Amino acid sequence: MNIEQFESALKDQGIELTGTQLEQFDLYYHTLVEWNEKINLTAITEKEDVYLKHFYDSITAAFYFDFTKPFHLCDVGAGAGFPSIPLKIIFPDMKLTIVDSLNKRIMFLNHLASVLKLDNVQFVHDRAETFGVNPTYREKFDVVTARAVARMSVLSELCLPLARVGGHFLAMKAASADEELTTAQKAISTLGGKVENKVTFTLPFEESDRSIIIIKKEKQTPKKYPRKPGTPGKSPIE
């Protein structure tokens, strides 16, 4: 996906990029590739692949969920900033917090935010499990996102404790979403969530399947969740 195709595909979805936003994506790409030589951020470095598989893929969340109203978003395990930084570029009024367990990635994100001149952003070096029991962050976010971090039963325990009651958790998944969702039903309900919608679509050019699972937080998460670091992955709620 070249830049013209990127711009055109977003326009088809009602998102018209400004010159400033196009420049920000260009800076994002070059900063990502430059830092990737020092620390492992992504295996995808070809420009057309980054624009499709990272930038465009991240923004697809906004095709199925309303990002136009200002809110506070938490992105769990965002790595090099996906999906939240591309969404922040498109929707600059959004307040953003990213939590990631690797400090080198947090250093990259701080540098990136400076290069892109992003405001209302916060990057926290922490495990999602300990972040989720911290009263500063627990049940404080309007929207929580995660992309390709863990299977749904595990991901729900990392993300739902962060969403406020009435807020949403958006899980961005590849092809195995149906099977994962079936297994995760108990975890989602135990943690206070209810599946509001699941959309499946095809990423253009590559023709690969993607799914976005939208979960509404209907009640408070029991205090014992999330459990200690590593526990959700070893023994998920199933």
Image (cartoon, helix red, strand yellow):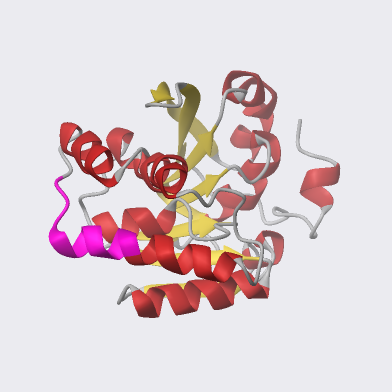
Which quadrant is home to the C terminus?
Answer: top right
- Vertical side of 134 occupied by 164: above or below: above
User: Residue 36 location in percent, x, y?
Assistant: 59, 65
- Vertical side of 140 occupied by 146: above or below: above
Q: Report the predominant secondary structure element of the magenta stretch.
A: helix
Residue placed at 39% from the left, 26% from the top? 205
Q: Residue furthest right?
A: 234
Tell me which segment is drawn in magenta.
16-26
User: Residue 187 location in percent, x, y?
Assistant: 67, 35
User: Residue 169 location in percent, x, y?
Assistant: 47, 44
Residue 92 in sight: no
The verdict on residue 24 being magenta is: yes
Decide which of 116, 141 is in the foreground and name it.
Answer: 116
User: Residue 65 location in percent, x, y?
Assistant: 31, 38
Q: Quadrant of residue 1?
A: top left
Is residue 44 rendered to the left or right of residue 226?
Answer: left
Is residue 36 rendered to the left or right of residue 49?
Answer: right
